């Protein structure tokens, strides 16, 4: 009797991506790459909406859309460090007039 060869199947999509031969299956390799980089949950989307809920209160309902977007971005990326001097320089370079 002949014995069958043991075939090991990958456990994760990253393992499948590594084992996939690009010369034989180029489209499958691309699909595995896309599939392995997709987020598993929608936590970032849910976090964005919860931030908007915190920012958009009754008192701030007259806020413009651009200011609301800016505040949301500042809250979401609050762990980034900002060079204040470069921001002031960029603001000073712009020829901006406020309408009253």
Image (tube, rainbow, N blue to C red):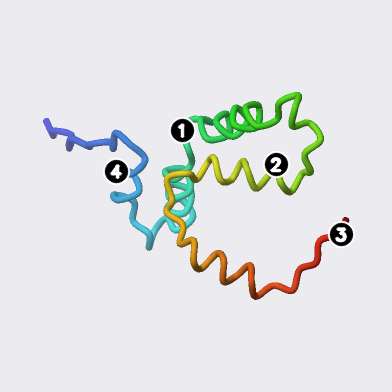
Q: CA distance from mark 4 to mark 3?
A: 58 Å
Q: Is residue 53 left or right of residue 78?
A: right
Residue furthest top as drawn? 58
Mark closer to the chain start, 1 or 3: 1
Label 3 crowd bin: few (<14), some (14–19), many (20+), radius 10 Å? few
CB atoms at circles 2 and 4 under 8 Å apart? no
Residue placed at 74% from the left, 74% from the top? 95
Mark closer to the chain start, 2 or 3: 2
Q: Is residue 15 left or right of residue 87?
A: left
Q: CA distance from mark 2 to mark 4?
A: 42 Å
Q: Secondary structure at mark 3?
A: loop
Residue 15 % position (x, y): 29, 43
Q: Which residue is mark 2?
A: 68
Residue 48 % position (x, y): 59, 34
Q: Quadrant of the N terminus?
A: top left
Q: Which residue is mark 1?
A: 40
CB atoms at circles 4 and 1 under 8 Å apart? no
Residue furthest right as drawn? 100
Using the image as rendered, state which of residue 44 and residue 94 is in the foreground. Answer: 94
Using the image as rendered, state which of residue 53 and residue 97 is in the foreground. Answer: 97
Q: Is residue 93 left or right of residue 22?
A: right
Mark closer to the chain start, 2 or 4: 4
Q: CA distance from mark 1 to mark 2?
A: 28 Å
Residue 84 % position (x, y): 49, 61
Q: Which residue is mark 4?
A: 15
Q: Secondary structure at mark 1?
A: loop
Mark closer to the chain start, 4 or 1: 4
Residue 100, by quadrant, is bottom right
Residue 52 % position (x, y): 65, 32
Label 4 crowd bin: few (<14), some (14–19), many (20+), radius 10 Å? few
């Amino acid at each position: 009797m002949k014995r069958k060869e043991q075939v090991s199947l990958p456990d994760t999509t990253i393992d499948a991506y590594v084992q996939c031969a690009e010369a034989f299956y180029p489209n499958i390799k691309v699909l595995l790459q896309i599939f392995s980089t997709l987020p598993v949950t929608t936590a970032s989307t849910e976090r964005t909406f919860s931030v908007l809920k915190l920012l958009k209160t009754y008192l701030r309902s007259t806020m413009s859309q651009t200011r609301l977007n800016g505040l949301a971005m500042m809250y979401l990326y609050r762990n980034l460090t900002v060079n204040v001097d470069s921001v002031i320089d960029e603001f000073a370079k712009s020829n901006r007039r406020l309408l009253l």
